[in-house]
Amino acid sequence: MSDRASVGCAGETSPIHGSPTSQLRGLKGSKPPVSLPASSPEDDKAAAIISLNFIVPKKEINMVPDMGKWKRSQAYADYIGFILTLNEAVKGKKLTCEYKVSETVEKLLSLLNTLDRWIDETPPMDQPSRFGNKAFRTWYAKLEQEAEALVSTVIPSSVRAAAPEIAVYLKESVGNSTRIDYGTGHEAAFAAFLCCLCKIGALRVDDQLAIIFKVFDRYLQVMRKLQKTYRMEPAGSQGVWGLDDFQFLPFIWGSSQLIDHPTLEPRHFVEEKIVNEHHQDYMFLECIKFINEMKTGPFAEHSNQLWNISAVPTWSKVNQGLIRMYKAECLEKFPVIQHFKFGSLLPIQPVKP
């Protein structure tokens, strides 16, 4: 299938808003579209969204043959479109650059700060097992109870009915409370959560940089704190043969940030001195810094895939390769996608021709 998609930030292509279709930015062979309006007319947009019947998302991919349904679905097109649109938006930009921070972004940061505070209020328990601290279940129970209320504080009152649907993705984005693990499927749920906020018009085109540099970056900080505090297991980890035990998207968006950098090349990220000097500006290097803190021994041994990537000559090639790898290793893997949930905002129905 093609990667043309309705990515859903208000004012962009969206099945809800019915805005004019446009090709995604940054895809091979596609030209950037004309500049998009900052928002669509408020009344029309509100009417279009309110007419939607929001539903609580549920699993639809139950067997390996169902994967074809996923790849043909509107949800897949919208999700990958969202990832690639943001990939293009952050190209060549530092985390510390100037960008607009909207009221919705501030509310999302407040939500994530609440999750962070709950970790402080829920210390790990004394237990014989080193990994998977059971206090995570107490923390998670609080999120399960409060998720809808938290989402309601972020979205406009006109679409408050969407809160139960969108809250499911928030709950799915922090790890599994039974296995006390976290992996790329949970990370994908948070990206889906942000995608849904775009589709209902809570987040807009001019929020794109803040979505990654403020919201997603803060989400990563909270997830790292969860992983460290409760010694969470990596979900479906491929060990040294995987890219990273827990994350994937910050490597994609982080490599896009570094495209055409005047001095930093892929070979440099294995040098600890360079990582320590530049990690505050680049998400990719933040990820490497976290790996260096968490793992011991030679980098080539504990993070073999990343070591191999450091030999790629340009960040542009790294970025393209990581997008291909993300599709193959995450989005096309049944053990990951079987947990993905589908509703009215990310529907299982096929893309309309």
Image (spheres, rainbow, N blue to C red):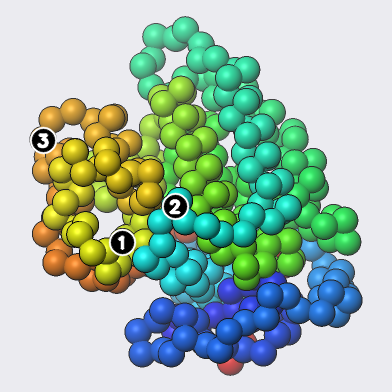
Within-10-Å neighbours for mark 2: few <14, some 14–19, many 20+: many
**Residue denoted by label 1:** 258
Amino acid bearing label 1: Leu
Among the two numbered marks 2 and 1 on one chain, the one whose residue lies closer to the N terminus:
2
Amino acid bearing label 3: Pro
Amino acid bearing label 2: Leu
Instruction: Give the x, y percent position of residue 249.
Output: 41, 56
Instruction: Give the x, y percent position of residue 272.
Output: 19, 38
**Residue denoted by label 2:** 95
Q: Is residue 203 visible?
A: yes
| Disc 2/disc 1 C-alpha distance (Å) | 11 Å
Q: Judge depth for marks 3 and 1 and give the one in front.
A: 1
Q: Is residue 318 visible?
A: no
The local secondary structure at tag 1 comes to loop
Observer-nearest of 141 and 208: 208
Q: Residue at x 73, y 53 (%)?
A: 103
Within-10-Å neighbours for mark 3: few <14, some 14–19, many 20+: few
| Disc 3/disc 1 C-alpha distance (Å) | 24 Å
Confirm or deny contact between disc 3 and disc 1 (CB under 8 A).
no
**Residue denoted by label 3:** 298
Among the two numbered marks 3 and 2 on one chain, the one whose residue lies closer to the N terminus:
2
Q: Residue at x 50, y 81 (%)?
A: 24
Q: How many discs appear?
A: 3
Q: Residue at x 74, y 66 (%)?
A: 200
